[in-house]
Image (tube, rainbow, N blue to C red):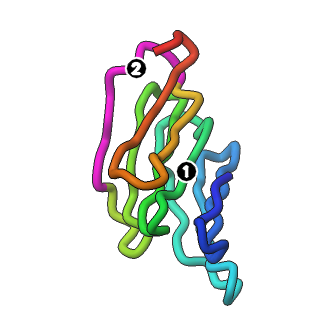
């Protein structure tokens, strides 16, 4: 689960591999989609509240534009399940780590 810095948007993930992003102010569902081929282990929203990063058990990290729902980046190269993603609070950097220590 991830919440935007302004507390307006929540991203949640289920065992059915579905991600849901409602607008917390209105209660309306903004997006629902399958971000990975395996479960999402972690997620983070950037400081602007415009991008969502997801860490997948499929060994990939993806970045999504929350306004359009489109993927902006698909990052591969981890040798294990990606367990953590984190945006830098002030710079345009994304960090990730997997269960192999990479």
Which residue is found at the position 53% from the left and 10% from the top?
100
Residue reaching furthest to the bottom: 26
Badge 1 local density, few (<14 within 10 Å), some, or many (20+)? many
Give the residue at the far front of this rendering. 90
In the figure, is residue 17 to the left or right of 70? right
Quarter of the figure with residue 60: top left
Residue 80 percent coordinates (x, y): 49, 16
Tell me which segment is drawn in magenta: 72-81
**Which badge, 2 or 1, is on the more N-terminal residue?**
1
**Tag 1 secondary structure:** strand
Residue 82 in percent (x, y) is at: 52, 27
For the point 44% across and 35% down, which residue is it?
A: 95
Taking depth in this image into account, of 33 and 78 the one nearest to the observer is 78
Residue 78 image-quadrant placement: top left
- Alpha carbon distance from label 2 to label 1: 18 Å
Residue at 33% across, 56% down: 71
In this rendering, position of residue 92 left or right of residue 38: left
- Provide the residue designation for mark 1: 44
Q: Position of residue 25 (x, y in %)?
A: 68, 86
In the displayed structure image, the side of residue 98 where residue 6 appears, left or right: right
Q: Which quarter of the image is occupied by the C terminus?
A: top left
What residue is rendered at 51% in x and 42% in y?
Answer: 86
Dot in front, 2 or 1 = 1
Residue 58 in picture, x, y percent from top left: 47, 28
What element does badge 2 sit on? loop
Task: Name the residue beneath numbered marker 2.
Answer: 78
- Residue 81, compared with residue 33, is above or below; it is above
């Amino acid at each position: 689960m991830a919440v935007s810095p302004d507390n307006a948007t929540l991203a949640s993930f289920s065992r059915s591999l579905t991600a849901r992003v409602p607008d917390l102010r209105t209660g309306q569902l903004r997006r629902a989609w399958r971000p990975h081929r395996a479960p999402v282990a972690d997620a983070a929203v950037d400081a602007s509240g415009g991008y969502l990063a997801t860490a997948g058990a499929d060994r990939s990290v993806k970045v999504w534009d929350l306004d359009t729902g489109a993927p902006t980046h698909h990052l591969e190269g981890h040798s294990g399940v990606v367990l953590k993603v984190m945006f830098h609070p002030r710079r345009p950097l994304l960090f990730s780590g997997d269960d192999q220590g990479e």
